[in-house]
Image (tube, rainbow, N blue to C red):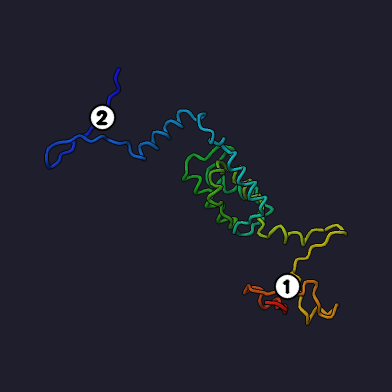
Amino acid sequence: MPSRRWFATTPARTGSSRQKVTISDRARNEAKAAQMRDHPEDDGAVIVAGKRLESVRQSLASRGYLRSSKQYAPPEDVLSKIRELAKSANISDSNKKFTDNQQKFDFLAACFTTFKHSVPNSCLHDIECVEDALAFYQTPVSTITPLESLKSVDLPENLHIQHEYVRFHPETDTMFGGKSAFPKSSTVVTGLKYKDKYRGHEAKKSWP
């Protein structure tokens, strides 16, 4: 059977002409997306549910990335308070999912009023029942960096961490007559935060 070609007729000044209808990029993308939904195994870039989120979490943990958040320490009676809030919201089964978004919103709003600690937007989809909210409010949130946390850890005797910067200055480091191991290297402090805390030193150079 011969293939069909579709044409659209457009008026012109000298008569009528036929112009071929082209498929737009949007239509082509929509067709490709529909094909991928019908046959997800054909796309090698499809990621199994949960794998991508876990890889991002591990990446952030390995880089030591610290989100801007408020510190939170769960109270000792967090379990009893969560149960009281659930009872006030007429929730009898703590493992049963919320009936609707309104019930979930009212319950989490009451939790925020009680604990002064809100569920971030990135974790709202994980809170499906009262038990999920209990697990969230039982988890402490620390706002200190891993390096700062080592200040309160008992380190081995052969390990020492210098938390403050050590900068050479000929007027204060006089053990070797104010001479540095790197006589041609300057220790210039450019940051406004540490400019008043650390003194800079510009080394003399015998060549331009």
Assign a secondary structure to mark 1. loop
The quarter of the image holding the C terminus is bottom right
Q: Quadrant of residue 166?
A: bottom right
Name the residue furthest front.
207
Residue at the spot 56% in from the left edge and 45% down from the top edge: 87
Residue 65: where, in percent of width, then height? Answer: 64, 55
Along the viewing direction, whichever of 130 and 128 lies nearer the viewer: 128
Residue at the spot 78% in from the left edge and 80% down from the top edge: 170
185 sits left or right of 95 in the view = right
Name the residue furthest top.
1
Q: Earlier in the sequence, mark 1 or mark 2?
A: 2
7 sits left or right of 200 in the view = left
Along the viewing direction, whichever of 116 and 175 lies nearer the viewer: 175
Assign a secondary structure to mark 2. loop
Residue 192: where, in percent of width, then height? Answer: 62, 74
Q: Which mark is residue 6?
A: 2
Residue at the spot 75% in from the left edge and 66% down from the top edge: 163
Q: Which mark is residue 185?
A: 1
How busy is the neighbourhood of tag 2: few (under 14 within 10 Å), some, or many (20 plus)?
A: few
Q: Quadrant of residue 184?
A: bottom right
- The correct choice, above or below, for 202 with respect to 144 in the image is below
Spatial CA distance of label 1 from label 2 is 75 Å
Name the residue furthest left.
14
- Residue mark closest to the camera, 1 vs 2: 1
How busy is the neighbourhood of tag 1: few (under 14 within 10 Å), some, or many (20 plus)?
A: few
Along the viewing direction, whichever of 61 and 28 lies nearer the viewer: 28
158 sits left or right of 82 in the view = right
